[in-house]
Image: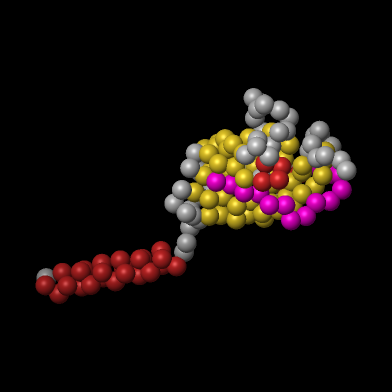
Amino acid sequence: MKFFSTLLLFCSIAITTVSAQNNSTKKAPPFTVDKVSPPNHQTGRTNYVLSNSEKDLKNRDFIFCTDSNSTVAYLTINGFTIRLAGGPNPENILAYNGSGYAVTFSITKTSSNTTINDKDDYTGVKVDGILSIYNSKGQVIGKKVTGVEINAVKN
């Protein structure tokens, strides 16, 4: 009986140790960024719509969108839609804050006018960039995104 008790204790310690080692090597992201729909109640027309990939963009699976003044942005984190407010000139700053998150969007590439798909009125300048999302704990997720700037100023 004593042998079985010792064996059981040893096995439980070994399993706990192995389990702890396996969990420490896998780092889960601090939060997830999910699909978001441009809201109907925003102050202006949609301006930026961004997706994880070209395929998501064509399927209208957006993860970030702004209003036509680019002063308000929307994103869904861990299943909750978050409204973010920008500065007085976010077209240049492209930084938003709200609900314990700070978000910056930096454009890395622009190209000529594009249409997302035939069913949409989303036509504008195609943009690629980096969306960086920070939470109040100092954790950050950086995502390469592609999208459309719909109300781009024509030069």
The quadrant holding residue 81 is top right
Q: Position of residue 90 (x, y in %)?
A: 67, 41
The quadrant holding residue 96 is top right
Q: Closest to the observer: 123 or 56?
A: 123
Q: Position of residue 130 (x, y in %)?
A: 67, 54
Q: Closest to the observer: 53 or 133?
A: 133
Count of numbered circles on the image: 0
Q: Residue at x 59, y 36 (%)?
A: 85
Q: Closest to the observer: 54 or 123?
A: 123
Instruction: State the residue lying farthest toward the front.
Output: 88
Q: Is residue 24 depicted above or below 32 in this figure? A: below
Q: Which quadrant of the figure contains the N terminus?
A: bottom left
Instruction: State the residue lying farthest toward the bottom.
Output: 3
Q: Residue at x 73, y 30 (%)?
A: 45
| Left or right relative to 6: residue 108 | right
Q: Position of residue 133 (x, y in %)?
A: 57, 50
Can residue 99 be seen by looking at this rendering? yes
Magenta includes 105?
Answer: yes
Can residue 115 be seen by looking at this rendering? no
Q: Is residue 155 depicted above or below 7 in this figure? A: above
Magenta includes 131?
Answer: no
The quadrant holding residue 113 is top right
Q: Residue at x 47, y 61 (%)?
A: 27
- Main SS category, magenta section: strand
| Left or right relative to 68: residue 12 | left
Q: Which quadrant of the figure contains the C terminus?
A: top right
Give the magenta part as a residue range: 102-116
Q: Residue at x 46, y 64 (%)?
A: 26
Q: Position of residue 132 (x, y in %)?
A: 60, 52
Q: Is residue 29 depicted above or below 61 in this figure? A: below
